[in-house]
Amino acid sequence: MKIGIVCYPTFGGSGVVATELGLELSKRGHEIHFITYNQPVRLELISNNVHYHEVNVPEYPLFHYQPYELALSSKLVDMVKLHKIEILHVHYAIPHAYAAYMAKKMLLENDIYVPIVTTLHGTDITLVGSHPFYRPAVTFSINKSDAVTAVSQSLKDDTLRLFNIENDIHVVPNFIDLDKYHEGFEGCRRGMLAQDHEKIITHISNLRAVKRVQDVIKVFYNIQKVMPAKLMLVGEGPEREHIEMQCQELGIMDKVIFFGKSNEIDKILSYSDLFILPSESESFGLAALEAMASGTPVISSNTGGLPEVNIQGVSGYLSDVGDIEDMTKNAIHILSDDNRLRSFKDNARKESLKFDLHKIVPQYEAIYQDTLAKCVVS
Ligand code: GMT
């Protein structure tokens, strides 16, 4: 199949999933066209089956806001015509599903029918999309998609609750390349992160308020009072300054390493003893899955899709949002006994196998095939 993929090219989970999906589909023989405003961060263009087309939005002083949707829909029209793209898979409803619908309508004028698969990732529904300013356009775009997927049952339920949806929603969870994530890495020493007797605690996110990184710091502060530990904070975002101030106030600056945006999260996770994800809302929690695949147990909140990923008492523990005491108790329980830590690590890896990309990517392929078949019939 010739598949066009539209996504955010950033470190965010939706862009990562879209990129990894495209790369795996290309290995399975499909021709993939990424269409976005920057080359996606995890995209390696070393296959003749993978193409990247940049959407340019020329600056014009009359426009208070530059019209990205307009440029994207025009680019989609041109790329579908030029490369004979058969199906468009758009990741994140806003504004991608909306722009794809406009492209589809323009292409129909030329008797070209290109169906749209929309994948809902989370904040496009729970935080941004359900805002009254956007809700009508998001509802319309979801209902006009030829197929809709959500990354967890919880996100599907939220979508049905928040919008008036007439379409079926297929649950296709996030997935992981198990060969890329594992414990320990040759040529990379744990000693570069912490001393042997120190436990390594990690958090990875875009440091937005929804991630509640302040809770990570509070839990870590409690842990390091009881045992030697270091905290790895990976990612950049608006909360970074607050977090630095919080660490300073608590006197733990020397125990926290700020990595910023890193392309080496597989290595950092492979040496981690515990991953903390206390989010306010989380449709799936790809970072938690990446941690589990690296053999790192997870302390998380019990919000959204997290209970579908992190299994209570098996791969880690889940607590109510903001319950620092419970998170601390659970973290210390896992870390304070080496045999127990070993069994949580093994279980975390085992639980991650459910999300093996070889199991999940065929589900997207089946959706493309069904969608194309339906379009031929109708
Ligand atoms: O978590 C973020 O802030 C990034 C966000 C995104 O849109 O890129 O991630 C969302 O999509 C990921 C991939 O499907 C999910 O694993 C994350 O749970 C989800 N984030 C939230 O729901 C907050």
Image (cartoon, rainbow, N blue to C red):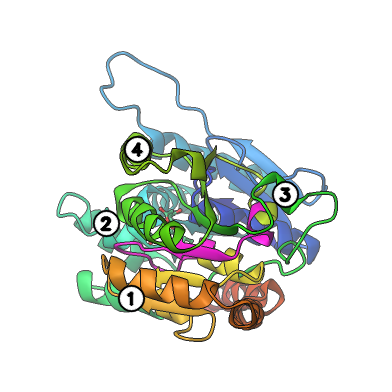
| Residue topped by disc 4 | 238
Q: Quadrant of the N terminus?
A: bottom right
Nearer to me, 324 or 185: 324
Chain-order first, disc 2 or disc 1 = 2
What's the magenta region? 268-287
State the image coordinates of residue 276 (x, y, percent, origin top left). Answer: 45, 63
- Name the residue beneath numbered marker 3: 191
The three-letter code of the residue at mark 2 reads: Leu
Earlier along the polypeptide chain: callout 3 or callout 1? 3
Q: Secondary structure at mark 2?
A: loop
Q: Earlier in the sequence, mark 2 or mark 4?
A: 2
Q: Is the residue marked by circle 2 packed among few (<14), some (14-19), or many (20+) residues within 10 Å? A: few
Q: CA distance from mark 3 to mark 1?
A: 31 Å
- Above or below, 312 against 60 in this view is below
- Disc 2: residue Cβ within 8 A of ligand 1's nearest atom: yes
Pointers 1 and 4 in contact (CB under 8 A)? no
Q: Residue at 38%, 77% (x, y): give it.
A: 318
The residues bearing labels 2 and 1 have C-alpha atoms spaced at a distance of 21 Å
Contact, CB < 8 Å: mark 3 with mark 1?
Answer: no
Q: Considering the numbered disc 3 on the image, is that residue within a helix, a strand or a loop?
A: helix
Q: Where does label 1 land, which residue?
A: 319
Label 4 beta carbon less than 8 Å to ligand 1: no
Mark 2 vs mark 3, foreground winner is: 3
